[in-house]
């Protein structure tokens, strides 16, 4: 990835980090939840929370699978229309969470290839491949709804970007492997899947960014 490209995205991701807060909206409504809060536990693990709801908090966590997940459905929509079908939701998420639309699009393509029905063998669901546990914490009420799924995934990306000071490599790795794995290894985890994932997302991001420039 070119240094100038890395620097430009890092600047965008750091916009909220530097101010110490972000507009965290609930997917499916216009209600604001207040600023993202950062805390360090006694064990040194950094936690990021985006407000609270009755019965618990929205602390970001790795995408842990439930014991009994949904049936596996690999991406099957190959129509050309799928590439622009969710543009409105992507733009909304980019504006709400102050992320580059091209970056959200790159994550989305890598995760589900634009198929809202996709379910991975690990149990991740929808366009942004959210685990049910993560979706709940990101305030997603209907994980199969394209808009809510995109907003939930973007909210998680915003939290990760805040946590890792806008570093695109660590943010992307954490979306795949979980933030605790990135913290544990002090960088991109030594998982073949995660390392390949980061490369693919950044390649897609560069391609989408170049397309936007024309």
Image (tube, rainbow, N blue to C red):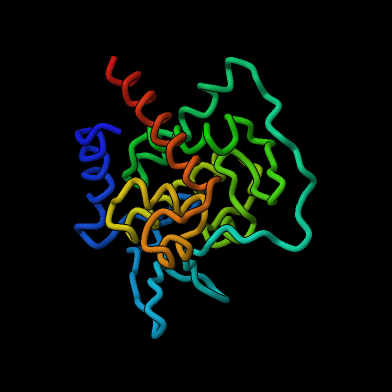
Q: Residue at x 58, y 22 (%)?
A: 82
With 83 as the anchor, is 18 left or right in this view? Answer: left
Rendered view: 62 above or below 73: below
Q: Quadrant of residue 204?
A: top left
Image coords of residue 132 (percent x, y) = 64, 56
In the figure, residue 69 lies in which quadrant?
A: bottom right
Q: In the image, what residue occupies the spot 68% across and 31% down?
A: 75
Residue 99 relative to residue 182: left or right? left
Q: Which quadrant holds the C terminus? A: top left
Instruction: Depth check: give the residue in front, 61 or 167.
Output: 167
Give the residue displayed 21% in from the left and 40% down from the top: 7
Question: Which percent across, then down, holds residue 160?
Answer: 39, 56
Q: Nearer the viewer, residue 97 or 125?
A: 125
Residue located at (37% from left, 52% from top): 170
Q: Relative to 152, does residue 59 appear above or below in the rendering?
A: below
Location of residue 134 in the rendering, given as x and y in whole percent from the top left corner: 57, 58
- Please indicate whether residue 9 sits to the left or right of residue 146 in the image: left
Nearest the eye: 31 or 198 = 198
In the picture, the quarter occupied by the N terminus is: top left
């Amino acid at each position: 990835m070119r240094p100038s490209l890395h620097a430009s995205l890092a600047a965008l991701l750091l916009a909220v980090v530097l101010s110490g807060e972000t507009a965290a909206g609930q997917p499916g409504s216009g209600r604001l939840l207040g600023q993202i809060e950062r805390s360090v536990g006694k064990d040194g693990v950094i936690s990021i929370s985006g407000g609270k709801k009755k019965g618990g908090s929205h602390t970001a966590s790795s995408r842990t699978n439930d014991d009994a997940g949904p049936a596996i459905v690999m991406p099957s929509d190959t129509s050309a229309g799928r590439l622009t079908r969710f543009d409105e939701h992507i733009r909304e998420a980019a504006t709400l969470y102050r992320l580059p639309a091209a970056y959200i699009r790159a994550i989305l393509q890598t995760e589900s290839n634009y198929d809202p029905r996709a379910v991975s063998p690990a149990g991740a669901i929808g366009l942004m491949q959210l685990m049910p546990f993560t979706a709940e914490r990101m305030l997603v009420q209907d994980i199969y709804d394209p808009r809510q799924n995109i907003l939930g995934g973007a909210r998680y990306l915003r939290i990760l970007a805040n946590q890792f000071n806008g570093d695109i490599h660590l943010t992307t790795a954490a979306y795949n492997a979980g933030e605790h794995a990135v913290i544990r290894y002090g960088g991109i985890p030594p998982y073949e899947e995660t390392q390949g994932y980061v490369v693919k997302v950044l390649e897609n991001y560069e391609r989408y960014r170049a397309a936007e420039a024309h």
